[in-house]
Image (cartoon, coloured by chain):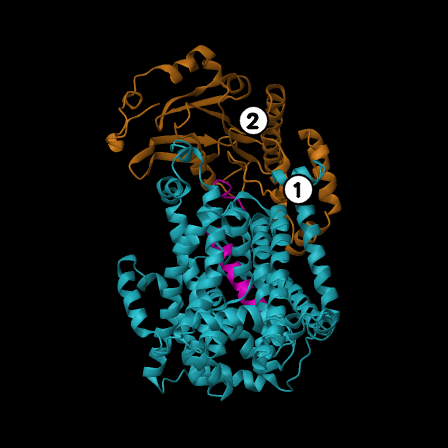
Amino acid sequence: MIALSGLLPSRGSSARTLNGVCLLMIGGALLALIGADIQLYSVDPWQELSRIGLGLLQPGWRDFPTLLEAVGQTVAFALLAVALAAPLGLLLATVFHWLPVRLLCAALRSVHELFWGLIFMQLYGLSATTGLLAILVPFTGVFAKVFAEIFEQQSPEPARTVPPAAGGLKRHLYTLIPQSWPALVSYTRYRFECALRSSAILGFIGLPTLGFHLETAFKQGQYSEAGALLWAFLLLIASIRFWLRPRLIPLYLLAALWLLPETIGFSNGGYLWQFISSDIWPAAVRAGEWGAALDWYAMMFNEQLWPGLVQTLLLTQIALVLSGVVVLATYPFASRALAGPVLRWPGRFLLLVLRSTPEMVLAFVFLLLFGPSGLPAVLALALHNGGLIAFLVANDSDAERNGPHARPDDPKGLMRYAYIETPRRFPALLALLFYRWEVILRESAIMGILGIATLGFYIDSAFEEIRYDRAFLLIAVTALLNMLVDSLSRRLRRLARSDRAGLLSRRH
Amino acid sequence: MTDRTGSSAVLFQLARQSLSYGEQRVLDDITLTIRHGEKVALLGPSGAGKSTLLNLLYRQQPECSAWQPQGGGLVDLLSVYQNIFIGALDRVGSLPALWNLLCPLPAHRRAIEALAQLLGLQEKLWQSADRLSGGQRQRVAIGRALYRQQPVFLGDEPVSSVDPLQAEALLKHLLEKHETAVVSLHNRQLALDHFDRVVVLRDGRICCDCPASELNAARLDEFYQQPDSPAYERPEPASEGWVIRTS
């Protein structure tokens, strides 16, 4: 709140400031509704929905070995990628104060896993290397940033007692890393869950993980098979804490190496160099014809960049506000203080399903129901992110139930929701929402792969047409947009930040 | 409550009550009866079990007690007005209460404005609670207790952060507005001046329970000082082993 009181006259109200921010966001979303393509195409979505629901209720296991293999490979990619990305991120975090490192990490994480997948696919084909790198590269950037933030939160006292001549790495090894070890481990654990989701959706671009089988099953209308795959994935995520034991990790890593698909992608350095130095630049630039290059860029801007950019931003804005609505509507059903000790379990289960199912999968299902517009993307993003944040908010409410502010005469039910819980959770809720903003943006860009007219649509088409110059430009613009939103959301978060909110947003 | 009019009606009763948090005994064999109309001050060194005792009492009469816990239990994001209004939530229907969050209900607005005047909070009425000082927050908590409009007041050091002059005036007001009151205090003089019964707790036991008129400051001080209890000499637990203590 210190930053806040510095910003505003001291006689204001914190609630008014936050409400102002909210109204701005809601206004933006309402304006976005005008321009966004969120039409309902399908005539009778309910029939299809009931068939999908039936499939979920009656999952079929026709090909058990294939299912098992898909689950195994999903875990293998995620595990190996995190095992490599976390130490790399830790190393980068120790030199995070160095501007080039910060920029590099921002660039790495501003490009979505699937786009990295599409890029590496051009170099290494449909291979284990592609899958691993697609997760590893962006995750390294995320780990570096978050680990550095965790270090910042530690007391600087121990580091000051280290001889000044000792280098940065040694100082980190003996002070900051042991100090923050629990936070580092808990974040890595959470990231592993994200890696499982990323690994699963890499199937959408052809890698042999769960997403591949899921897409096939849905496209062929075999909903009971799709149901089985979805349940398998949810079980996998829900049971992480039972099977991911620190002592078993070396064993798992060996098993993961053995499970990886046999096609080890290989590409000689020459091709990589050709890709970077020539393939990704338009012919006019390579030839040095600046007039033609300018025409090319103008054509790209008018035909692809601008429309893609606008749709991406509009859908992001609507999805962000809708996520907030989902949080406010669902968190009470999972909180002990509001739903009661027993009734909160169905609510928690629903939120667990929402947060475990990747946006891409949700969007894919909605796409079948509502037809190819922005609507499926918005719904999927709002449900997934809203569920995720609501889960954290409910946990937060449970943790503070017997805290220092609890009173035995606090009101119950709806009044407790309106007067006690929601105002107490609101700053953290907003901080989390703004933290997810860049994630929502990245995801709504990627939804284009499913055929929604966001930036991802043009990127996917460019790769399909083997026009790497176009793909590179579009990805670069997407990444820049992401970095812009990241810095804007950081500013807005500072407005909403209380200490707890800071803690929470760091974790997610 | 059994009988409001009978001056001898028993409101709170504890018979040989003990309570432990894990290993630590917080209340030890407490027997206490508080009747309607009594004004009881609860004294004793910190950690003696005053808050725990008050919590026990509150649980016996939650419906007719205005409760003021030590932290105040304010909701940071809500304004002073809303934080005081929470005291009236049982008197207001759900829909008006929801509407009140958007636009204060006129009748309550007038009442709470008057209350804020009394508390010296009229300037702060529309500020959120997180922007108040400790003393101001405590006055908001007092406001919520007063706005409960109940016959019984249970307060855990209700005026500890307010400046001395204001503390005395507010305490007097609280006692006037409630027929019965049980209040823990750390200011012994306030207890002697404004209450008719004083209960002193020490190490979870009641070591004195008598009319305030029979006590004076010097006698009260003895209860805080005499080091007869073994708890005061108890050595530090040796759990820290080899750690060299520097403080």
Q: Distance between the residues labelled 1 and 2?
A: 20 Å
Q: Residue A237 in the image: x percent, y percent?
A: 40, 67
Looking at the rendered image, the quarter that the N terminus of chain A falls into is top right
Q: Can residue A398 be found in the magenta stretch?
A: yes
Q: Is residue A400 visible?
A: no
Amino acid at pointer 2: Ser
Q: Can residue B191 be seen in this view?
A: yes
A359 shown above or below B170:
below
Tell how many labels: 2
Q: Which chain is orange?
A: B
Query: What SS does tag 1 mark?
Result: loop
Residue for badge 1: B79
Q: Chain A rendered in what hue?
A: cyan
The residue sitting at 66% across, 63% down in the picture is A317
Chain under numbered label 1 = B
> Overall secondary structure of the magenta stretch?
helix
The quadrant holding residue B57 is top left
Task: Give the magenta part as a residue range.
Answer: A381-410
The local crowd at label 1, few if under 14, some if 14 to 19, many if 20 or more residues have their Cα within 10 Å, is many
Labelled disc at residue B161: 2
Front one among B68 and A478:
A478
The residue sitting at 38% across, 42% down in the picture is A179
Amino acid at pointer 1: Ser
